[in-house]
Image: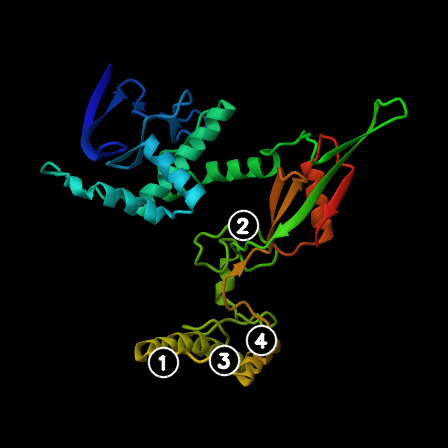
Amino acid sequence: MTKISFKKCIVHTFSHGPVPALTGSLVCQHCGSIYHNNCSVLRSDESGSLERHYHPLDTPRFIQVASHQYVEASVILQWKNSMNVAWVSMMNCGRICDTTFSSLNVQLPDGRPYTTNLQSEHLFDAFIIISLLQDCKIRGTTLVVPHEGEQSERFRAAMEAQNRRIRMSGHEREHFCNKCIRVHNDSDGQPHRMIETIVMDGVTLGHPCCGVHACQTPLTSNRDCFCFNHWGLNNVCFVNVCGAGIVAGTRACSGVEHQQLFKRLTEHSNSSYHRKERYRKLGVPFPLPTDSLLNHINARSKRAAGLYKRSQTHNEQLIFYLCGVVVARDMFYGAEVVTGVVEFVEITFQGTNMPNQIIYII
């Protein structure tokens, strides 16, 4: 026997904007499985935990992004196109929808403790879910994520697995075209030799990463300086050669020089901002730094090297054909060294034909 339950919700549609609705779910009283309009909640045979299985046959028309919020798939696809073509941010996509349908004056029935406005979290979840569903549809697999836990962590493992697969094997391998392939004929006019060339280049797109050199463990939050494995370094002096414990309320140890250096760094960042605001309110142009100030800053940075702010990755390394087709991409954390480049090429073309020539742009 099955049990049917309904709950109130808001559906953000493409044609009519936010619409009050009811969503139903079926509960199997024998095994406890729950069936929603776009996914099923089943208990895993291996771990025994609850898992959320999204239907693999087709992308559902309505995707749940919150407990009482559903978004039509066509609306999410419009957000994706706006971000890809016009570089519209997530926040502005939500503002456009709210502004477009604000004149409708949607009246919610009594007893609904939520609004029709879209939050940034709703848009991010919608973008992530539909992207993962489209990828699973292409590969003919089912999207399985944990049902319990925080919503911000629910799709992390699936996104990391997709990024790893696309980064190393999700691009075109056996590519042939007249722009990047040259075929040399023999004396009889028959194809004799083919020359294939690829290009490697690093794009300086820094992303927040752990402050430990070459550590690839992701940060818990983009505001952190260290990952979970190196979290204890937050209690160590920010000067690299020191290693002593910090004084409460600072990032430096009890040493006089390190405390003075930390004080100068914080005063420089804070006073510069407040002084600029005072000049702006008075209508006076903010003065440019003098040569003596620049020399002082440069000399100060050379005296002691330390991790005062959040670290970033070195670059994104790209392998592409001469025609522009991307073969693979990977993140370089510490530096763009030759050994890392060689390893990247070997992993990329493992099991396929190695190109004849590699143009490495330094």
* Residue carrying label 3: 289
| Residue 280 visible (yes or no) | yes
Q: Mark 2 belongs to which amino acid?
A: Thr
Determine crowd level at label 3: few under 14, some 14-19, many 20+ residues with C-alpha closer than 10 A.
few
Which mark's residue is nearer the viewer, 1 or 3?
1
Apparent side of residue 321 relative to residue 58 in the rendered image (left or right): right
Image quadrant where one finds the N terminus: top left
* Residue carrying label 4: 301
* Residue carrying label 2: 217
Quadrant hosting residue 323: top right
Residue at the far left: name it.
110
* Residue carrying label 1: 284
Which mark's residue is nearer the viewer, 2 or 3?
3
For marks 1 and 3, give the CA distance.
Answer: 15 Å
Give the percent coordinates (x, y) of residue 304. 59, 75
Q: Give the answer, above or below, for where 96 lies relative to 189.
A: below
